[in-house]
Image (spheres, helix red, strand yellow):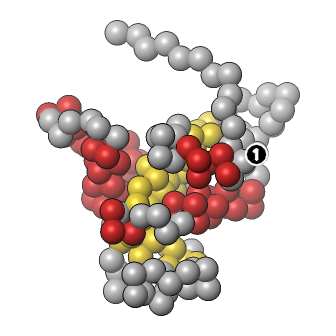
Amino acid sequence: MEQTDIASQQTLMGYEVLVIREATLNDLPLLIEQRRHMYQDMGYPDNPRMEDMEHTFGLWLHDRLEDGHYRNWIVETPEGQVAAGAGLWLAEWPPQMMDFSPFRGYIMNVYTEPGFRKRGLARQLVQTILNWCSEHGIQTVSLHASAEGRPVYESLGFCSTNEMRLSLP
């Protein structure tokens, strides 16, 4: 399990040391809960559809964590209190002219607990993911940004693309 001490970068809410660690299958309930909270913060109602999403996401996530196609990093206090988390889905991708890598990175589920916000934790997590991608030959990384997150991602070098989307019934 990979751990990074971020004490040298900040003191947060009286904690001298915060640790970034990689999630395991044991963290599955936490990762599902963070996803729920992320959607609630974006204004999605807490209704049966949210419960259905949690169930189907949990099944998807379990398999991806197990086979290594999804990775997640968690920020914790020394006492184990979770402050934030962010995930990386390694999506299989065909080689193209700009990138021959067989995978693209998709950053998702970036969530910071309310009491830990505005302290740079999301930035630190995304940078941790970008470093991991660089070390593992992942050349293209994308994400979808909330209005609150967009300035963080832009400051890390992310830019809008020409992707188009169609939602089928």
Write down the quadrant of residue 115 in the picture: bottom left
**Residue at 81%, 37% in the rendered image:** 100
Give the farthest residue toward the top.
Answer: 169
How packed is label 1: few (under 14 Cα within 10 Å), some, or many (20 or more)? some
x, y percentage for residue 10? 55, 81
Q: Amino acid at mark 1?
A: Gln
Name the residue nearer the viewer: 148 or 86.
148
Q: Is residue 79 left or right of residue 138?
A: left
Q: Is residue 160 left or right of residue 6?
A: right
**Residue at 39%, 48% in the rendered image:** 61
Q: Is residue 164 left or right of residue 135?
A: left
Name the residue nearer the viewer: 82 or 149.
149
Secondary element under disc 1, as helix, strand or loop, is loop
Q: Is residue 88 left or right of residue 156?
A: left
Write down the quadrant of residue 80 in the picture: bottom left
Relative to 53, does residue 121 appear above or below in the rendering? below
x, y percentage for residue 90? 58, 45
**Residue at 43%, 49% in the rendered image:** 109
Name the residue nearer the viewer: 128 or 23.
128
Q: Which image quadrant: the C terminus?
A: top left
Give the farthest residue toward the left.
Answer: 48
x, y percentage for residue 112? 40, 61
In this rendering, does residue 69 appear at all? no
Please give the residue where the numbered disc 1 appears in the rendered image.
139
In this rendering, does residue 83 appear at all? yes
Q: How many marks?
A: 1
x, y percentage for residue 152? 59, 52
